[in-house]
Amino acid sequence: MKRLLLGLLLLAAPAQAQPAQAQPALDPAPLRISLDGELQILDPVITSAYLTRNFALMVFDQLIAQDSTGAYKPQMLEGWTVSPDNMRYDFTLRDGLEWHDGTPVTAEDCVASIRRWGARDGMGRLMLAATASLEVVDSKRFRLTLARPFGFVIQALGKSSSNIPVMMPARLAATDPTKPIPEVIGSGPYRFAAAEFRPGDRAVFLHNPRYRPRAEPADGTAGGKVVHFARADFVSIPDVATKVAALQRGEVDYIQRAPFDYLAAMRRDPNIRVARGAGAPQFMGVVVLNQSQPPFDKPLVRQAVQQLMDQSEFMAALGLPADMHMAQCLSVFTCGSPYDNAAGAEPLRQPSLARARALLREAGYANEPIVVLQSTDVPVINTISLVTIDRLRQAGFNVQVRATDWSSVAQQRWSRSPVGNGGWSVLPLIWAAEDLATPLSNYPIANNCQNFPGWACDEATTGLLARFGAAIGLPAQRAVAAEIQGRAHAAVSLSLAGQFTVPPAWRSNLTGLIENPVPIFWNVRRERR
């Protein structure tokens, strides 16, 4: 969270053009990476799924990136300038950028990519709503002019989590933002080997010889993205025990989330390293309610679910060590972040099943069936789902469970059909702490009254978001954020299961691995022993 706070205060000065780093010799043995879930969707604009984000960071690049201190740095850009009134931003691309097909990256590509991303991402949508014009100046320069104050342009273009503003050729960025791009062409450090892709099983990435890493050292998602492997594989291993055994035997090099039941054993193994401290990503367990249909279209029914969210129950079920979770976090903006506050949280401090039952009676709940989407192949989400199902039943809900893999859930969550026709009511998830940390990136809040699963819509929040975007300085922003949180708790935009750490683990012969909340795989080498 210190990194996030600094990011709000530090905007990098436009950088001078840097010479590209020389490409080192490549390790011919593949870097083998096991992520949680099965990769199905390859377009990071049409989904906020973290698997797709991780895929995108391999093959695409961003205009701006964030280093480990939170400062925003030019990445594809040589730099940018801001007018004295903060209403005009001029961006210049660095030299030598090429797409994987050998064509040059142009300002036209970037403008088209920003527009497509902004049509789907909550923060991007708010930025474009405040924009008067976004136009090409020449092949390397483009300009964004605001219609009204919006103090988060650089933060929006530099965000490193879903939905990330990746750049793609204009011909692909012209694709309807609700439909997947027809091919994966980026400008990032790896190329996607489409012919070797087996959905739900394996994705293969090959070193991109056209990529010119920045000269600065790799730091966070910023700096020189130097690849040391000729090939990297995303390998799907759904079974937890099999995944851990593969890491122990050296059959995979990295697993995205170390299973809690195996943490002690992995920490004792000299051949395995488990992330600690700042390198261990934090998440919030959440329960999303479908507000577009009964019974969760009624605020009292949603408030009944709030009373089921005993975070100690969820954390106990996860089996987390004491140093890996908070006792209680009731801020919708990540606890420990700059916008962490207590507004509207008092009724949630002592959750009560009795109070939940009383709210259901008051709301006139008539035993209507509700459908819970349960992701069985992501252990953390599965555990949160099981606790949610149990607590809902104890409160008196008529619960039906649709248990399936995460990739299926990721697609089903967009359905607004009635539960009797394939729709859903309750969606347990985990969201990254960085995504929830600000009103402009927090999924249900930033997408308030938009087409986003759960379909939360609070008219007062819409006006508050505009005020937040225009607020200057952290004190003013914090004051508006507290108002937004008060509305979020009252309207039940999301229900909180607790904030905790899910560390990655990797073979100890990997060096240079950047411990970052978002997993990235440049700069890393394998030592020969």
Image (cartoon, rainbow, N blue to C red):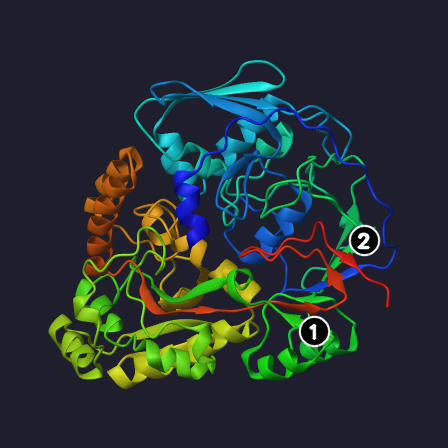
Q: Which mark is residue 272?
A: 1
Q: Which mark is residue 4?
A: none
Vertical arrangement, residue 315 with respect to residue 201, above or below: below
Look at the image and tell me in which quarter the N terminus lies: bottom left
Residue 114 lies, in percent from the top left, at 51, 32
The reply to whether residue 6 is visible in this rendering is: yes
- Amino acid type, label 1: Ile
Tell me what residue is drawn at x 77 percent, y 33 percent.
101
The residue indicated by pointer 2 is 231
Q: For label 2, count other residues whose C-alpha is less than 10 Å away and answer few (under 14), some (14-19) or many (20+).
A: many
Q: Is residue 478 left or right of residue 274?
A: left
Mark positioned earlier in the residue sequence (1 or 2): 2
Tell me what residue is drawn at x 35 percent, y 32 percent.
151
Q: Residue furthest left?
A: 362
Local secondary structure at mark 2? strand
Vertical arrangement, residue 522 with respect to residue 401, above or below: above
Q: Are marks 1 and 2 in contact (CB under 8 Å)?
A: no
Q: Is residue 447 left or right of residue 258?
A: left
